[in-house]
Amino acid sequence: MRCLGLDPDKPIAVDPWVARGRQRVFSAQIDPATFKNANYNKGYEALMRLGYHPQDAMDAIAFFKVARLQRPNDPLVRTGLYLAQDLLKLRQQKQIDDRAHAAELTQKAYAGLILGETGSARAFIVQALELDPNNANLRFVDSVMAIAGPESTIGGTPERRAAYKIVGNSLVCLSMQNDGAAVAMLQAAQRLQPHDKSIASLLFTLRRYEAGRAAAQQPSSSAIAPRSVMKSPPGDGVKSSDSGTPHN
């Protein structure tokens, strides 16, 4: 046992399996049946999907766990499960980091809007959307900036530049769900540039958006109970129709 590389200064530990007369088995060859297991193959297919999505790693973990139930002592299945679990941790951390970076880019975009640099501001929003594509607020701001961005880069009078600075401020208010201030600012921008079609289109879009949000916040008519004819409370002296005596 010393020739196996054990430390000669430490006592030799006896394998409990050997002491009990049981055989210790280590896999020296790969079982070809592993590659025929459907869940094992589906686990790696999930990991090979395009993108860097945590859900793909979660799917792979589920497949490998089923494969482990089918082949409990298979080292290849165990390795696949460990790999999927490690990838899930990495992808979840990347998702957190991407959202934080997207929030930083969004703040830069807002700064550009306030300064009237809607072209560069939209570039920041596009980068933020690539990192956080499911952010509904970013998608809406991007769609609105698609209208204002090209027009704001066209050189013009000081009034026009001032109007688009106001437009940028209105979009920042909109992103903070301050719809009233956003509408008021767009109206002010329209007074500076009454014939600007982009500002008019933005104002029309924002009014529709504000009306839709207000309608979504109102309770439905079915949730309000209809008012019925009020009945007289007991003991008010109103006679019953069948007994002719006051209610008790």
Image (cartoon, grey):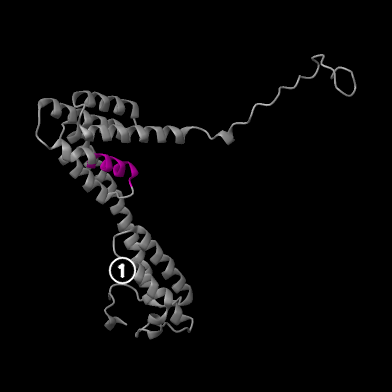
Outermost residue, top direction?
Answer: 237
- Residue 221 found in image quarter: top right
- Residue 214 vs residue 84, the one in the foreground: 214
**Residue that numbered label 1 is attached to:** 48
Residue 55 visible in image: yes
- Bounds of the magenta segment: 135-146
Q: Main secondary structure of the magenta part?
A: helix
- Horizontal side of residue 12 vs 230, given as left or right: left
Residue located at (32% from left, 66% from top): 49
Crowding near pointer 1: few (<14 within 10 Å), some, many (20+)?
A: few
Q: Where is residue 100 shown, x and y percent of the image?
A: 27, 45
- Residue 229 vs residue 137, the one in the foreground: 229
Q: Where is residue 183 shown, x and y percent of the image?
A: 30, 27
- Residue 85 found in image quarter: bottom left
- Horizontal side of residue 167 vs 61, given as left or right: left
Q: Where is residue 25 shown, x and y percent of the image?
A: 41, 83
Residue located at (74% from left, 22% from top): 231
Residue type at mark 1 is Met
Outermost residue, front direction?
Answer: 195
In the structure shown, which secondary structural element does the residue marked by tag 1 occupy? loop
Residue 207 located within the stretch drawn in magenta: no
Q: Is residue 93 above or below residue 139?
A: below
- Residue 114 vs residue 146, the one in the foreground: 146
Q: Which quadrant would the N terminus be assigned to in this image?
A: bottom left
